[in-house]
Image: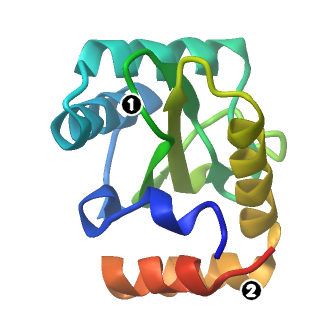
Amino acid sequence: MNLIAPLITPDTTLLDMSFTSKKKLFEHAAELFARTHALKAPDIFTSLFERERLGSTALGHGIAIPHGRIKGLKDASGAFYRLKTPLEFDAPDNLPVSLCFILLVPQDANERHLQILGELAQLFGDDAMRAKMLAAAAPHDLIALLGAWTS
């Protein structure tokens, strides 16, 4: 099994969402993680927003992997967003983002955090896999797709 599949659930796999900005996306994700992990939404939003200010988390090809370190989080956690209307993310190829995996890790995470980011980059670097993620009909289809993927 890969490191990505266990990070998402049907509740954290959101398809065809619309946001007017990265800020709105991060606010939604902060509320989502606050509900699902009993964390403070402002802490999550600040972590994601501050990391993004250091440099865009967009990889190109319509992909972004915003991530942050969260005090009090026990294990890495993720949320997958497929956006109905792609968002500007200052991507290296100037393409807007339509697939977004938001990753939260514990404050003191190190090697595992880097391994997950590496797997996400490999996953999203696969043209055929991106096409399948864009075509998935429901959250459980996307979760199954990610669960079957090997690096």
Secondary element under disc 1, as helix, strand or loop, is helix
* Label annotation for residue 135: none
Secondary element under disc 2, as helix, strand or loop, is helix
Q: Crowding at label 1, few (<14), some or many (≥20) Cα neighbours within 10 Å?
A: many
Tell me what residue is drawn at x 66 percent, y 70 percent: 2
Q: Quadrant of residue 92?
A: top right
Name the kind of residue labelled 2 in the image: Ala
Q: Nearer the viewer, residue 148 or 81?
A: 148
Quarter of the C terminus within the rendering = bottom right
- Across and down, in percent, residue 24 comes to 33, 31
Of all residues, the one furthest to the front in this rendering is 74
Left or right of 108? Residue 78 is: left
Q: Crowding at label 2, few (<14), some or many (≥20) Cα neighbours within 10 Å?
A: few
Mark 1 and mark 2 residues within 8 Å of each other at the beta carbon: no
150 versus 115 height, above or below? below
- Across and down, in percent, residue 96 comes to 62, 49
120 versus 34 height, above or below? below
Residue linked to disc 1: 26
Residue linked to disc 2: 128
Q: Earlier in the sequence, mark 1 or mark 2?
A: 1
Q: Quadrant of residue 138?
A: bottom left
Give the CA distance from mark 1 to mark 2.
27 Å
